[in-house]
């Protein structure tokens, strides 16, 4: 099995903080409640591609891959050793 990409909500939080935005400001920009935004940032709920694109636009990110972590399964990891 090949590597998979997994959304990394910590990167989203880091970008928000680095750009000086409050959670409520980002939520309003994205058109979601502050509670929903907090759950997205904590990884408790998923984020849709449109909402992620809005967030990326807000913080000036053009390469969406920064919001994902590449996970390599154990079988692939062992082959590389």
Image (cartoon, rainbow, N blue to C red):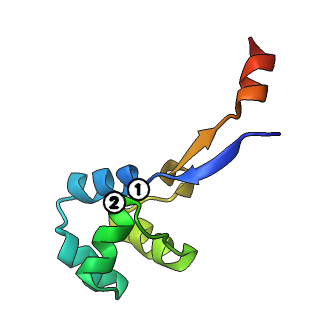
**Circle 1 sits in a helix, a strand or a loop, which is it?**
helix
Residue 37 rendering spot, x and y as whole percentages = 32, 74
Residue at figure coordinates x 69%, y 46% from the top left: 4
Query: Which label belongs to residue 44?
Result: none
Residue at figure coordinates x 41%, y 60% from the top left: 43
Residue 10 rendering spot, x and y as whole percentages = 36, 50
Q: Quadrant of residue 31?
A: bottom left
The image shows residue 3, relative to residue 28, as above or below, that is above
The residue carrying pointer 1 sits among few (fewer than 14), some (14 to 19) or many (20 or more) residues within 10 Å by Cα, namely: many
Q: Quadrant of residue 45?
A: bottom left
User: Which label sits in the foreground, 1 or 2?
Assistant: 2
Front residue of this view, candidates 30 and 79: 79
The Cα atoms of the two marked residues, 1 and 2, are separated by 6 Å
The image shows residue 70, relative to residue 14, as above or below, that is above
Identify the image quadrant of the N terminus. top right
Determine whether, in the image, residue 74 is placed left or right of residue 23. right
Label 2 sits on residue: 42
Residue at figure coordinates x 42%, y 70% from the top left: 57
The image shows residue 61, relative to residue 49, as above or below, that is above
């Amino acid at each position: 099995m090949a590597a998979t990409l997994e959304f990394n909500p910590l990167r989203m939080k880091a970008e928000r903080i680095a750009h000086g935005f409050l959670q409520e400001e980002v939520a309003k920009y994205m058109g979601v409640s502050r509670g929903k935004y907090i759950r997205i940032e904590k990884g408790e709920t998923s984020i849709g591609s449109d909402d992620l694109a809005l967030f990326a636009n807000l913080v000036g990110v053009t390469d969406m891959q920064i919001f994902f972590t590449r996970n390599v399964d154990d079988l692939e990891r062992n082959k590389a050793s």
